Amino acid sequence: MSRTTRTGEIHVPILARVEGEGALDLRIEAGRIEELKLRIFEPPRLFEKLLEGRSTQDVIDSVARICGICPVAYQMSAVAAIESILGVTPGPWVEAMRRVMYCGEWLQSHSLHIHLLAAPDFLGYESAPAMARDYPDEVRRGLRLQGLGNEILRTFGGRSVHPVGVCPGGFFHAPEAATIEALRQRLAEGLEEARELIAWTAGLPIPEDDQDFVSVSLRHPRDYPITAGRIVSDQGLDIDPADFEQRFREFQVPHSTALHAQLDDHPYLVGPLARLNNNLDRLPAETRQLLDDCGVAFPSRNMFHSIVARAVEMHVALSEALRLTEDYEPAAEPHAEAPARAGVGVGCTEAPRGILWHRYELDEEARVVEARIVPPTSQNQARMEEDLAASLTRFGLERDDDALRLHGEMVIRNYDPCISCATHFLDFHVLRK
Amino acid sequence: MSCENESRGTGAYGNEPRPAGPSQARQEGADGRPAGHAYLFGLGSPHGGDRLGWLAADGLRDALAGRDDVSVDCLAQPVDLFLHAVTASDRLLLVDAMRGQGPPGTLKAFAPGELPTAAARLSSHGLDLAGTLALVEALGLFRAGIRVIGIEMPEKTGPDTPGPEMTAPGLDAAQARRLHAAVLDWLDAG
């Protein structure tokens, strides 16, 4: 058999260093990929059905349980949708502190992924502990920044795991000024580490792998998008989140318990790289300068530059948290009143892994009649398969199975997929005769 | 400050400064604390049988209040131990709920290598106990000793059993005394 006409099958039965249960199946015939499936076999979790009949506060607390690392994203998309139905407009203090809380989530999620999940791939280690023996300072930096993100979550949410501080109209409680002052000292220390982190990620041996893809993200009139904005793409899409269903379609494929999604019938990318590609002009000035100095050009078509994008977003998160807590004073009324009202509402925010879209219908008692949640990992599934086919082909299908398996896992991990989040729905059909 | 006071943004990990430790892992002797300091962390959450680690830490914090050679705190996730000023010369004692090791309230001490290997997991959602201890070892921390004490949960603390056993498992006086004695033995064995 010649090196260019290889035939065979490769199976990665369990994906390591991602959340949830998935696998990769690859069939190569005559040197070409004939079939590639990112199989998601984690059981569906049926969260949308569980929300029916729940009160708005139940929704906010329950959706936080969908994800252990992005509970704030779920809460913020949910509360935005709910407030749009109830006719509640949060005040400037609430808007600012929600953005700070969300920054905490970006910080902890991105730091974990950069230092413990992705960096070992680029540096050639089989695990984070193996890398930690040679890069102890970098791993400690990652743990500190992750811990700082958790600290922000605790400050506003009472705890970092499944926080409980958010309610319709705002927060249950405003942090004391002394608490925020102590936090700000640590944020300033973290910002210095984030500056170094951008240069460090840009200096990693990142493979060259430019591809064509559509970047989809939120875009805010003024700020780097986190809690609000229109849904845009680098191909001209510019819609209100309420119009999401007109252009985006979710559908089931036989090999996945998580829905796939397409924009105008094509795969698309959400997440840090897409956000950065679409929002370079919304970066804080210092962050933009650091990015310009790091030697990696954005917008980027190289999916592996996601690790640099995450580092940039950690700097954004720390800069924004510091800016928004300057001259902090606790709000006398940390939440607005939220009367019960029926209606349909949509919320869309930027989870660490990309846009997270929620739609709720509430009855007159503001209880859920119907819920729909579209998480980022579902949206990225079709793009991941597209990426795997292109990246493995460029890598070289003639390579041995172990090399292809490792490269495939690296491609998947680069998306930081949360399979547990994605398997939220089961399209169940029964045929009876 | 009790871990159990945690509520909607007002608890021990809410709007008050954390009770123990500088913000970052320190260099040796950076805060003047003598080498060989002990850290005792209760692992858990406010829910069900998982509360036992926090309940134990709350009780031990009071019982050990007169000692300056040990810091006591509650952690929602093991990886949060890196928020404390830990060094190579310190010692670590973790207290966590466990299942399948005897009647409710049974105490069992583990060395890191004795933990079930199936528990080791590193995912995009964080580090579990075994993964955290693997990082601790790789970073060369707590070389003066690591111990994990498991407390057997009540049988009926699963999600199918709402009611007092689900919401309020705890240690009775005898169990709390045994735990205190085990911790003192470990501390004084230095």
Image (tube, coloured by chain):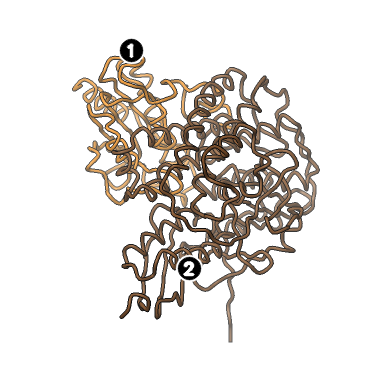
Q: Circle 1 is placed at which residue position?
A: B32
Whether residue A30 sits left or right of residue A244 in the image: it is left
Q: Chain of mark 2?
A: A
Percent x, y of residue A377: 55, 56
Q: Same subunit under labels 2 and 1?
A: no
**Which chain is rendered orange in the image?**
B
Q: Is residue B56 visible?
A: yes
Within 10 Å of disc 1 (Cα), the crowding (few <14, some 14-19, many 20+) is few
Q: Chain of mark 1?
A: B
The residue shown at (37%, 21%) is B61
Q: Is residue B169 visible?
A: no
Percent x, y of residue B137: 27, 36
Name which residue type carries label 2: Ala
- Quarter residue A237 falls in: bottom right
Q: Circle 2 is placed at which residue position?
A: A389
Percent x, y of residue A268: 61, 61
**Which chain is rendered brown in the image?**
A
> Depth check: B18 or A381 in front?
A381
Q: How many marks?
A: 2
